[in-house]
Image (cartoon, rainbow, N blue to C red):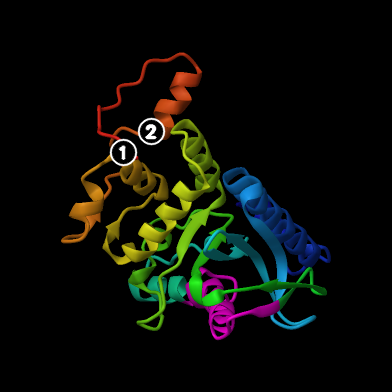
Amino acid sequence: NHITEALENPQNKFSDKYKKVKAEIVEKQFLDYFKRVFGDGAVYHTSVCEERGTKEHDILIEFHDYILIAEVKASKVREPFFNPQKAYKRITDHFRSDSGIGGAYAQAITLKRIIEKQQDIVLYENKNNKFQIQDISQKIILPLVLTLNQFGGLAVNTSLILEKDADEPYPWVCNWHDFENIIVILEYLHKRGQDFIDYLVWRVENHANILSSDELDVLEGYFMDSRLKESIKSSAAFFPPNGPSLIDKIYFEKHGIPYDYPNTQNSG
């Protein structure tokens, strides 16, 4: 945190360049993660513009009948004050800013609305390269917000402070570290791109009913607890942070260390 504060200090002449390079690296890393999940089965677009040279959207992915609009944010976590009222305002101000989760969600929804108004649409990637999306009425558009840092429960359940229209979906929010581990879990369970999409759809539909501080706990519950998909229809689901962890089991197995993990029925 101290190094980041020093590098991003506005008094340093290189601070803007540092932020720009950091954002580019984070975006590229997330794109590489998506490619590990979907492989050649998806079409990937970066720096997507609604019109040539207009405001960019970070990543757009076409996978079968799904369109993923992912906005990437590399801003650091804003630490709250001890005063609860000031702390809440500080957190919500950052959440709703252009560099926060809420601001990223608003960007994704803007592009979603533009796309879904048409049956076929022409967009531009890398600012100038034209591409077309067809048969939009047959596709499902999912908004994603990807962050460099971990924002805890505020990211796992954005319904706590997110401002959105009732007819718009919640976003799926995930940080760099969790996405990397999600890929490890998917590979361990022999899941494919469609399995991941099914999880995203389920997450978005049940977003407000999920109580957790860690996306990995939610993913683990989805794939390992066969009762979850039914029980969440009638009540909120809580994922405790202190239970056995699938990602820990995978780690210890790789190092030949026994790990006590309960025998749960795999829903896959």
Q: Secondary structure at mark 2?
A: helix
Q: Quadrant of residue 202?
A: bottom left
Q: Which residues are magenta?
A: 93-122
Name the foreground residue: 95 vs 215.
215
Task: Specify the amino acid type for callout 1.
Answer: Met
The answer to whether residue 35 is visible is: no
Q: Residue at x 75, y 82 (%)?
A: 54
Q: Quadrant of the C terminus?
A: top left
How would you classify the magenta stretch by its main secondary structure?
helix
Residue 232 placement (x, y as % from top left): 22, 57
Name the foreground residue: 100 vs 134.
134
Q: Residue at x 45, y 67 (%)?
A: 171
Seen in the picture, residue 7 relative to 181 is either above or below; the reply is below
Assess disc 1: are there few (<14), some (14-19) or many (≥20) residues with their C-alpha within 10 Å of its C-alpha: some
Residue 150 placement (x, y as % from top left): 49, 53
The answer to whether residue 41 is visible is: yes
Residue 167 placement (x, y as % from top left): 37, 81
Q: Which residue is mark 2?
A: 246
Q: Residue at x 31, y 38 (%)?
A: 224
Seen in the picture, residue 123 relative to 13 is either above or below; the reply is below
